[in-house]
Image (cartoon, rainbow, N blue to C red):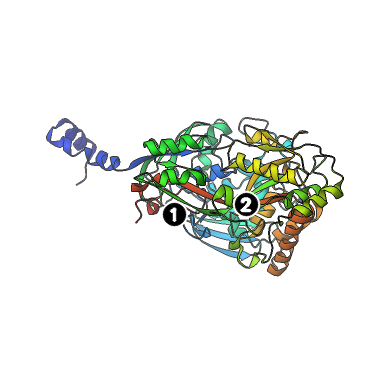
Amino acid sequence: MLIHRRHALGLLGAAAGSLALPVLSFAQSQRRTVTIAVQKITNNNTLDVWNEQSNVGERVFFPNLWEGLINRNWMGDQGGVPGLATSWKRLDDKTIELKLREGVKFHNGDEMTADDVVFSFSDERVFAGTQPDGGETLYADNFKPKTDKELPAGVPGVGRRLWPALRGVEAVDKYTVRFHNASPDVTLEGRMIAFGSQIASRRAWDEAATYADWANAPVTTGAYKVQEYRPDVSLTLVAHDDYWGGRPPLAEIRFLEVPEVASRVNGLLSGEYDFACDLPPDQLDAVRNTAGLEVQGSTILNHRIQVFDKVHPVLSDPLIRRAMTHSIDRQLIVNALWDGQTKVPAGLQFEFYDDMFIKGWTAPEFNLEMARDLVKQSGYQGDAIPFRVLNNYYINQVSNAQIMVEMWKQAGLNVEIQMVENWGQVLEDNDTRGIRDWSNSATFNDPVSSIVAQHGPNGLQQQRNEWTNVEMNELSNFMQKSTDRAARKKAFARMLEITEREDPAFQVLHQNCVFTGMKSDLNWKAAPAFAMDFRADNWNAS
């Protein structure tokens, strides 16, 4: 029966009819609100995928808020699946055409069209007039915003990190777009999956008074939309009932920032939180042994690393950096801090690279005698080497740093921990910058998604003036343009030699592992990623 406005008002006034109206309210009430305790919500205090390129950002962004043309199969093999595009095809080595999903609604009720896609990869939104296929490092100092509506200084560099040669996107018709590259690229499809290539509403951007206003509540197509964002405190997402993928199963998702592990665990045990994220292995039994609670977790496509500042007077000598990489007993750290639940990877690469994976490559061996000899060769005089450390942004970060300092000490290296409060302090370019913690992900199954994206010409290390290498940059540009798979693999192998052996940019420590405590009755499954999927297919799943 159709209920028009007059009939509905009549029901409101009738006692008998009062049972009819709550049908919708009752149905709504069946959708649960969940509270998730996280260590950190975002690092840059925005909800912009181009500005917040972080592990914590992945958790709150995907797949619930931001979506791309090709989505990542978060609950599966982490490959590409149709998202806002239903199909795609290569027109040549530099061009790909995609058919958009019709009827997709943004959070403001507008239909997504080709115009929104064109905008999402425009100069205004991300590239700021940078030239495609430039091959040179882009520094934030060259892109400082002149108005409140312009992009943050770091965004154009991040854009060219992911899309180094994109010339632009063409709207063929309302539901068809073409991506045009300046040079061949075998990874175009993967780049569309990656962190940043998600679609935003053009009208919402145009109507926002400032970038900050827009970035605190971006209008996207995801299953949930922003209700309230309180930086450093909480993020509340509510159901987007016009979601193209089906009615969201939750009414509300509340992410609460709870920096201390003990507070996250105690809140879960008391029932205050439905989920507690980023649990270290020594806290898992407390959750597992509590009735009604469980732990889910696995290794993910992310490696914990330490990054070297080559500009530092001591670390400018590659012998010292090589000594540092051979001083660390990685397996001992995995056993002691992770209870053996993760592993030491084969350098900065991932097995899902398939035939691009370099078999036989390993992280630098633990060899204290070799490390001491390298220190002796360098003529090192015992000067302090600073190591900037956050208070457990990464699981067991402080304990891990303390162990490594002792291992470096055995090799004759004087490393001093400097506790800092935020990423701005970690990355600050001054005399005390030496070593820092980091992690590197692979957002699609090719080496350019990690070693080039993070350590190539427009990787964060080079954009922050920490490290550079001419041959590495030449190889990076080759990797991004070549269509010869065998030649690309050979180039990748050489890049590993440079960055992990000859002129170390970083040292790989172990593969990252994510553990989440939760209420068992939720019947929710954790993805092998930082991301938490609260769409219909992953709620009350048996």
Query: Front-most of 55 and 323?
Result: 323
Residue 361 location, x and y as percent? Answer: 69, 63
- Would residue 195 be visible to someone looking at this image? no
Mark in the foreground, 1 or 2: 2
Q: In this rendering, is residue 484 above or below 133?
A: below
Horizontal relation, residue 498 to residue 22: left or right: right
Whole-percent x, y for residue 380 in the image: 84, 43
Residue 352 locus on image (x, y percent): 58, 62
**Mark 1 vs mark 2, CA separation in Å:** 53 Å
Q: Amino acid at mark 2?
A: Leu
Q: Is residue 503 left or right of residue 23?
A: right
Tell me if mark 2 has few (under 14), some (14-19) or many (20+) residues whose alpha carbon lies within 10 angstroms of its own.
few
Question: What type is the residue that disc 1 sits on?
Answer: Glu
Question: What residue did someone put label 2 on?
Answer: 332
Q: Is residue 370 above or below residue 253?
A: below
- Seen from the viewer's position, the closer of residues 324 and 250 is 324
Q: Nearer the viewer, residue 92 or 72?
A: 72
- Does residue 246 appear in this view? yes
* Residue under numbered circle 1: 102
Which circle marks residue 473 in the picture? none
Quadrant containing the C terminus is bottom left
Task: Place residue 313 in its image quadrant.
Answer: top right
Residue drawn at (19%, 32%), measured in percent from left and top?
12
| Residue closest to the eye, 115 or 189 | 189
